[in-house]
Image (tube, coloured by chain):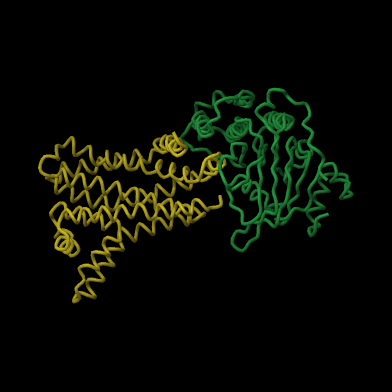
Amino acid sequence: MTAAPQPAARHGLALVSRRASGVEVERLDKSFGRLRVLREVSATFGAGRTTALIGPNAAGKTTLLKCVLGLVQFDAGQIVVGEDTVGQEESYRRRIGYMPQAPSFPEYLTAGEVTRMLKDLRGQGAALDEDLFMQFDLADSLAKPVRALSGGTRQKLNAALAFLFRPEVLILDEPTAGLDPIAAGILKQKVAAARDAGATVIITSHIIAEMEEMADDVVVLLEGAVRYQGPLSRLASETCESRLERAIAQLMRAGGKSP
Amino acid sequence: MNAATRILRYELQNVRRTRAVLVYGLLLMAVTHALLHFGGGGSRAIVSLLNVVLVFVPMVSLVFGTVYLYSARDFIELLLAQPVSRQSLFAGIWGGLTLPLVLAFVLGTGLPFMWNGGLGDGTAAPLLLLLLSGSLLTAAFTAVAMWIATRHDDRARGLGVALAVWVVVAIAWDGLILLVVASLGDWPLELPLLALSLANPVDAARVGLVLALDAPTLMGYTGAVTQRVLGLPGGAALTLAALGLWVIVPLSCARRRFRRKDF
């Protein structure tokens, strides 16, 4: 019973390069050796929505994201990104902008060279979104080797690169970790704008207040299975807890079967 | 230009800027120069150089290769999240790792010969063979490094395996051959020993070069055997083929693993 996507205030221009393309995960299974990390996970990440993927440590969040990215090859099930099925061609990743948790770039290249390399690899000359480069004031950093940049600046570069190609799907793993409050605010605005323009946004975070602020939907993973899925607003009523923090804590404690 | 060459270009930039490759090249240059300067004629210098190369090249390729690959791990993940196939990425990474090392080796050992005028007295062919087998050894051991790094997620264990491989090929193998000779000396061992030598890339390179230098006795048993069985051109061709195989086999193993790997 997911609410229909509502791409609100649509910015006419941005829409041209962004078709609505959600991410559909169906009965996904993945084991590492004997450890079953994902158990028949089915989840929908709608276009024009921000979905928070939450769960305790080792619940399978990162594995799920890595399956969508093609970094981890799943055992069974299916993932559809837009019109493309994951696992056939690599071109579907053109639709995705990924912001990894701990960014690591080749140490000896400059930030500008890393940016140029990704532009080269993507080969999407037109319609780049360099907005974050400007807002984060990265112009001076572009000439420096990445290893000379501070952790925060690297994280800014990481964010700016994820948005650079106007992806239809944004996968942000702990996006505000390591950012100062001002930069975090800029990033949150950027995420909201992308969502409003029709992008599918998937974020993980451990900061509940941040989720409450950014997310429309939640997917709660517990021991590799989906425990709850739906609009954030419904979570409170279903768990009879008014505060999100408590509601999530209750879900994580309860375990067992889905509602 | 396809994805692999694009990746290769930036990898080359990255590896080139690590000081290690530069230091490696300069060190080889210093050693070669010293050997040529103080060690007498060109062909004797090549024999001395051979021993340096056979110990040094595999070690640098293995250790630098694994260390580099582990430190590039997160970056490889970032690249895999781009619309790039795993095959292209694999080719780009291996090329970007191997080419600078090969270049450092060829320039580091080749240039001192040039400026010392050591090419005159019939050493051109052995020198060429030395450069060729050193380059193949580099490529073989960076391929082994890729295989180790894709197989073991733990950095410390990966480095341990790399060092173990080096100890086996550079040191322990000769001991094994000696052991076989000593204990089974009465049997006709020529061909099995030759096979055993070719099964180790370091020995294969040694056999080929010693044959080319027309000094098989320097190598003792296997050298004499090889010359008797094969003669010179055949020996060189056979060792180069063995080295080529040592590039291809680990590389295709590593590639297969890389394609299926979970990052």
Q: Nearer the viewer, residue A185 or B37?
A: A185
A150 is higher (above) or lower (below) than B24: above
The quadrant where residue B93 appears: top left
- For residue B32, side relative to residue A212 (left or right): left
Q: Residue at x 13, y 54 (%)?
A: B214
B34 is higher (above) or lower (below) than A138: below
Number of labelled discs?
0
* Quadrant, the N terminus of chain B: top left
- For residue A168, side relative to residue B2 (left or right): right
Q: Nearer the viewer, residue A256 or B87?
A: B87
Chain corresponding to green in the figure: A
Furthest residue toward left: B121
A22 is higher (above) or lower (below) than B155: above
The quadrant where residue A158 appears: top right
- For residue B28, side relative to residue B223 (left or right): right
Chain corresponding to yellow in the figure: B
User: Where does residue A2 sit, x and y in percent of width and height?
Assistant: 81, 43
User: Where does residue B168 sit, x and y in percent of width and height?
Assistant: 34, 61
Q: Residue at x 21, y 54 (%)?
A: B208
User: Where does residue B241 sit, x and y in percent of width and height?
Assistant: 27, 54
User: Where does residue A252 sit, x and y in percent of width and height?
Assistant: 78, 54
